[in-house]
Image (spheres, rainbow, N blue to C red):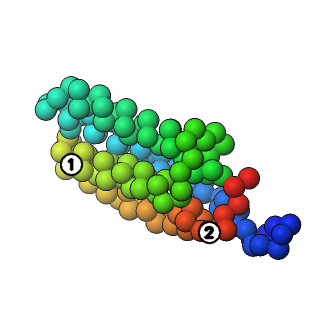
Amino acid sequence: MTDAADGATTLSRPDDRAASALRFATELVAWVATPWALASHSWLLAALSVLALIGLPTLFSTPGDKANVIVAVPGWVTILLVLLQLVAAVVSSWLAWPSWAAAPVILLAAATLVTERRRWRWLVSANRLTN
């Protein structure tokens, strides 16, 4: 924590390299498993799922969390987008893959949830530093 010029306490973004790596691995699973699970129902849904899973977090981000913000959203929206990726990865892997391949996805998602806690606390804090 640091003190701002006006005396208010601000929080800087936590170092989340491990969380970022786990989050990215989970996103990759979601990007592969979701269209795979939907392809047998509709190629259009499969394509739209990829656009949603990649496009939404690219378009909407919280200032201070990413270097380039296209559409600024509050921290809770970023958290919901991460949760969307986690749920998509777990559910889609079980629908698309055999259990031996889907089971590790649960462990990956759980590890991601645990390591994301500091970042999520920062994202929802009222006195978050945006620079």
Residue 89 at what x, y percent from top left? 32, 47
Numbered tag placed on residue 126 in the rendering: 2
- Asked where in the image residue 11 lies, by quadrant, the reply is bottom right
Of all residues shown, which one is farthest toward the top? 43
Numbered tag placed on residue 30 in the rendering: none
Query: Which numbered disc, 1 or 2, marks the residue closer to the eye?
Result: 2
For disc 1, the neighbor class at 10 Å (few under 14, some 14 to 19, many from 20) is many
Say left or right for 50 vs 62. Answer: left
Q: Residue at x 57, y 61 (%)?
A: 123
Say left or right for 7 vs 114. Answer: right
- Asked where in the image residue 41 lies, by quadrant, the reply is top left
Q: Is residue 94 above or below residue 128?
A: above
Q: From where the camera sits, is residue 108 visible?
A: no
Q: Residue at x 57, y 47 (%)?
A: 72
Q: Is residue 106 above or below residue 97?
A: below
Say left or right for 107 vs 25. Answer: left
Q: Earlier in the sequence, mark 1 or mark 2?
A: 1
Q: Which residue is drawn at 26% across and 54% down?
A: 103
Q: Which residue is drawn at 66% across and 52% down?
A: 64
Nearer the observer, 85 or 81:
81
Residue 1 at what x, y percent from top left? 74, 71
For disc 2, the neighbor class at 10 Å (few under 14, some 14 to 19, many from 20) is few
Q: What residue type is labelled 1?
A: Trp
Nearer the observer, 130 or 36:
130
Q: Circle 1 sits in a helix, a strand or a loop, which is it? A: helix
Q: Is residue 15 above or below residue 85?
A: below
Q: What residue type is labelled 2?
A: Ala
Numbered tag placed on residue 94 in the rendering: 1
Of all residues shown, which one is farthest toward the left? 41
Q: Circle 2 sits in a helix, a strand or a loop, which is it? A: loop
Measure how far apart labels 1 and 2 are at the Cα level: 38 Å
Q: Are marks 1 and 2 in contact (CB under 8 Å)?
A: no
